[in-house]
Amino acid sequence: MPVSATHFKGKLLICGTCVKDVSPEKFKELSKDRTVYTFCPEMTHASLLGYKLTTILRTCDVEDIWIFTKDGSPHCEQILTTLQEVAENVNFDKNKLRYFVTKKGRFSEITDKTIRKSRNIMEVEQLMKFNKLHKTVEILTSKGGCPNDRKETFETILEHFDEEIQELKKGLKNKDWENIKEELGDILFNIFLFAKVAENNDKFDIFELFESTADKFIKSHKNIFENKTIK
């Protein structure tokens, strides 16, 4: 980051050095009308980035900051967490921060909460179990996957639901907890499968389903969630 940190004013884009080569079109789009600072934690310690950013946010008239990095890079991740930490330390308005990542031609904006969550490895480990089922369904329904799963429709999956619910009732009646767990798992698999068919038909995906369901119950229990932040 060779530009002077004491004479900056306006909008800023901070990015990993590699993104200009990895995603040149998005880099050009995001850098429009912005001063660009590039940084490579692989070559320079992230603490130096922290010192520079602290000075910028403390002494300069910064309108907002966008961050653009390569997803999956342990070096680029340091840029995200360093900026987040610096912004909190100097009380910079985090609503003025936006985070963008790119990977294998894909591009996405991510939230401040996501970066904060990435620091909590035990929670990420638990979330990976959800992701494992999602990936399993994705592979089974993709080219080269399971022929039976690939031809599933909304109607056939509903038939599976009916079958699994009957099996669940039987397990509950017999207090067979291993069977109950298995049948609940089958129902869960079919929920993911249903969402995958919906995604393939441009309706919604499993992640939208997670979020809309959570929002629904948060809204219907306002008195409980009024003073709570879900992290």
Image (spheres, rainbow, N blue to C red):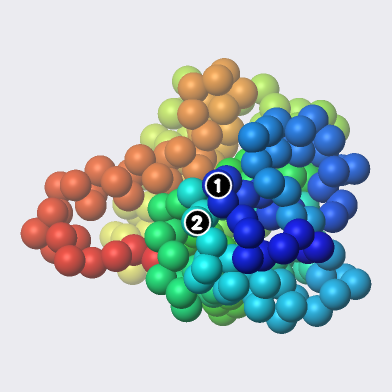
Q: Of the residues under marks 2 and 1, which one precedes in the sequence?
A: 1
Q: Residue at x 71, y 81 (%)?
A: 47
- Per the image, the residue denoted by label 1 is 10
Q: Secondary structure at mark 1?
A: strand
Q: Position of residue 70 (x, y in %)?
A: 77, 52
Q: Using the image as rendered, state which of residue 40 and residue 123 is in the foreground.
A: 40
Query: Relative to 71, is 161 above or below?
Result: above
162 displayed left or right of 152: left
The answer to the question of whether label 2 and label 1 lie on touching residues, with beta carbons closer than 8 A, is yes
Badge 1: few (under 14), some or many (20 or more) residues near its Cα, within 10 Å? few
Q: Secondary structure at mark 2?
A: strand
Can residue 181 be seen here? The reply is no
Q: Which labelled disc corresponds to residue 103?
A: none
Q: Position of residue 43 (x, y in %)?
A: 90, 72
Q: Residue at x 66, y 78 (%)?
A: 51
- Per the image, the residue denoted by label 2 is 61
Q: Amino acid at mark 1?
A: Gly
Q: Position of residue 169 (x, y in %)?
A: 32, 52
Q: Position of residue 69 (x, y in %)?
A: 73, 53
Query: Relative to 220, is 33 above or below?
Result: above
Cα–Cα span, label 2 and label 1: 6 Å
The quarter of the picture where the C terminus appears is bottom left
Q: Amino acid at mark 2?
A: Asp
The quarter of the picture where the N terminus appears is bottom right
Task: Determine which quarter of the picture holds residue 166.
Answer: top left
Badge 2: few (under 14), some or many (20 or more) residues near its Cα, within 10 Å? some
Q: Residue at x 50, y 70 (%)?
A: 58
Q: Using the image as rendered, state which of residue 108 and residue 168 is in the foreground.
A: 108
